[in-house]
Amino acid sequence: MPTLDRLSRVRRGDDERGAGESGKTDDDSPPLHLADADVAHRDFPGLTADHDLVIAHRLAHDEPWPADRVVTVALLEEPLDIALPADHPLARRSELRASDLVDERWVSVHAGFPLAGVLDHLSAHVGRPLEVAHRINEFSVTAEIVRAGAAVAVMPRTTTTPLAVDGLVLRPLADLTLVRHVDALARPDALAYAAVRRVLSVLRSVSARAASASPGPDSA
């Protein structure tokens, strides 16, 4: 994974600002400890009590992160696409309209989690409820369900592009803009440490490269 590779080089001290310029490594760099936490939108800021940096995501209409508790650094504004099995009739189109999807079965995340509001937004747009057949918070599992033809789903375009293979395609909506915001959250005191700022800089760089390299949703 490119992000983990870049972060490992921060630990060794030979990222772009390390050995590439000075030929020296920073043996005093603290070790990196990564953790995955599956939490609801409201609980992301609380994770900064135990972690120097928290990568969080939210929908555009969600409440912003509390400025009195955390510093927010924007990493990525990521389009959300519709994931379809490659043999689905709608997969032949380069883009879709919300009304095309009203009779589909859906995979959604659990209530309260950041992407749960997407289907509510879609339902309001088409004027009728959508059928949620499964609630799964893991994109890789969702991809398998879609690939098998059991449902369709909303998935982030940039970070789930590697999943859009082997019978799964991503298609954008033409009549509704769907995006999620991916941010880094930190306690103000954590950013006083050079090591934390260095990792944050790498995260911003990796996110910018991922956004610029992301293929079009109809490239599959």
Image: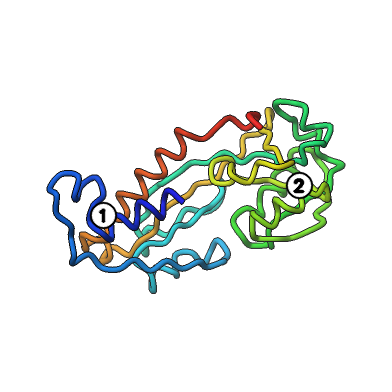
Which disc is residue 94 wearing?
none
The residue under label 1 is 198
Question: What amino acid type should be assigned to the residue bearing mark 2?
Answer: Arg
Q: Which is more toward the observer, 212 or 187? A: 212
Give the mark nearest the N terminus, 2 or 1.
2
Q: Which is more toward the observer, 124 or 21? A: 21
- Residue 26, can we see it? yes
Q: What element carries label 2?
A: helix
Q: Position of residue 12 (x, y in %)?
A: 26, 59
Q: Position of residue 193 (x, y in %)?
A: 22, 63
Q: In the image, is residue 147 above or below residue 40?
A: above
Q: Which is more toward the observer, 62 or 167? A: 167
Image-based side of 114 in relation to 210, left or right:
right
Label 1 neighbour load within 10 Å: few <14, some 14-19, many 20+: some
Q: Position of residue 80 (x, y in %)?
A: 61, 41
Q: What element carries label 1?
A: helix
Image-based side of 2 in relation to 196, left or right:
right
Q: In the image, is residue 122 above or below residue 64?
A: above
Quadrant of residue 210 within the rendered picture: top left
Q: Which is more toward the observer, 219 or 199? A: 219
Give the residue drawn at x 45%, y 43%.
Answer: 76
Which of the two marks, 2 or 1, is nearer to us in this view?
Answer: 2
Work out which residue is located at the far right of the displayed protein and give it. Answer: 103
Give the residue drawn at x 50%, y 47%.
Answer: 181
The residue under label 2 is 147
Image-based side of 32 in relation to 165, left or right:
left
Give the residue drawn at x 68%, y 45%.
Answer: 154
Work out which residue is located at the far front of the displayed protein and give it. Answer: 23
Task: Measure how far apart labels 2 and 1 are at the Cα level.
Answer: 39 Å
Question: What amino acid type should be assigned to the residue bearing mark 1?
Answer: Arg
Give the quarter of the figure containing the C terminus: top right
Q: In the image, is residue 76 above or below residue 10?
A: above
